[in-house]
Image (cartoon, helix red, strand yellow):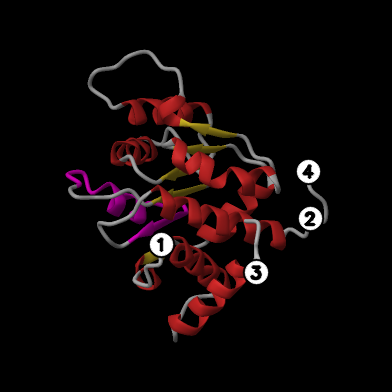
Amino acid sequence: MEWHVTDAQSLAIIDREIGDHVLSPAEYEIVRRVIYATADFEYKYLIRFSERALQSGAAALAARTTIVVDVPMVQSGIAYAVQNTFANAVYCSTETITRPQTEKTRAAWGIETLAKRYPEGIFIVGQAQTALTTLVNLIEAEEIHPALIIATPVLFFDEDDAKIRLQDSLVPNITIDTRKGNAVVAAAIADGLIDLAWQAYGLNKRV
C-alpha cells in the first residue's frame, strides 16, 4: 500500500479506538487494514487465523507462488502491492477461459480450472461462495494443497458449510466468523499480508 499522511492519521485513530486485544502484532496489522478499508471495528473480533496461516502465506509470497482470486475486484485491489513487491502472477477465476458448464457458476468452474493448474497456490475468495465450496471439495479430494486460502465471501446460506470445512482442514486459512464480508475485506487482508511478508523477508529492492 502506498501511504499518505492522511493514511497514517487514520491508522493512528484506529490504534486509539481499537482498545485492548489479544492479537499478535502481525494479526493486528491485518485487522487494522481491514478496519481501515471498511470503517467497521467489529472486524477486530471476526477475523480468524488458522495456525501458521500468516507464516505459510508469507513464505509462499516470497517464493513467488501464483495467486488465484475469484473476482476482478480482488485482483485490482491487490495489484499495486503485488507489483511493487514479489511480483507474483495473479489469475482471476471469472476471467479464465473455460468450456461452458451449466451445472457450475463461472467463478466455480474458473477456480477449479486454475486450482488444478496451480494446486499449491494462494487462493483469495472475496465474493463467490461457489468458488469457496469448489476449493474445499478439491482439498477434501486431495487434488490440491494450497499454501493459503483467504476466504471472506458473503454467506447468507451455506448448505455445505464450506467455511467450517475449510477451518477444520489442514490448509492454512484466514476467514471471518460472520455472514458479512466482501472483496474489499479479502483485498485488505491480502495487502496487509503482502506488506508483512515483504518486511519479514528483508528484500531491499523492488523486483
Name which of mark 1 and mark 2 comes first in the sequence. 1
- Callout 4, which amino acid? Val
As displayed, is residue 145 above or below residue 99? below
Q: How far apart in space, not on screen, are marks 3 and 4 (Cα)? A: 26 Å
Crowd band around label 1 with a 10 angstrom C-alpha radius: few (<14), some (14–19), many (20+) = some
In-front residue for pair 155/140? 155
Q: Earlier in the sequence, mark 3 or mark 2?
A: 3
Q: Secondary structure at mark 3?
A: helix
Which residue corresponds to the image point at 24% horizontal and 18% vertical from the top-left?
Answer: 102
192 to the left or right of 39: right
Q: Are marks 4 and 2 in contact (CB under 8 Å)?
A: yes
- The magenta segment is 158-176
Tell me the mark number nearer the camera, choosing from 3 and 2.
Answer: 3
Q: Residue furthest front?
A: 6
Q: Of the two numbered discs 4 and 1 on the same chain, state the one appearing first in sequence.
A: 1
- Judging by the rendered image, the residue that carries numbered circle 1 is 38
From the top left corner, tell me how far across and down residue 198 is, in percent: 69, 56
Q: Nearer the viewer, mark 3 or mark 1?
A: 3
Q: Which label belongs to residue 203?
A: 2
Mark pair 3, 2: CA separation = 24 Å
Q: CA distance from mark 3 to mark 1?
A: 19 Å
Q: Position of residue 66 (x, y in %)?
A: 59, 37
Whether the residues at callouts 3 and 2 have beta carbons within 8 Å, the answer is: no
Give the number of the mark in front: 4 or 2.
Answer: 4
Q: Earlier in the sequence, mark 3 or mark 4?
A: 3
Q: Which residue is mark 3?
A: 5
Q: Residues within 10 Å of mark 3 (few under 14, many from 20)?
A: few
Q: Name the amino acid, label 2.
A: Leu
Amino acid type of the residue that numbered disc 1 sits on in the rendered structure: Thr
Q: Circle 4 — which element? A: loop
Q: What is the spatial separation of the Cα atoms under label 4 and label 1, in whole angstroms?
A: 30 Å
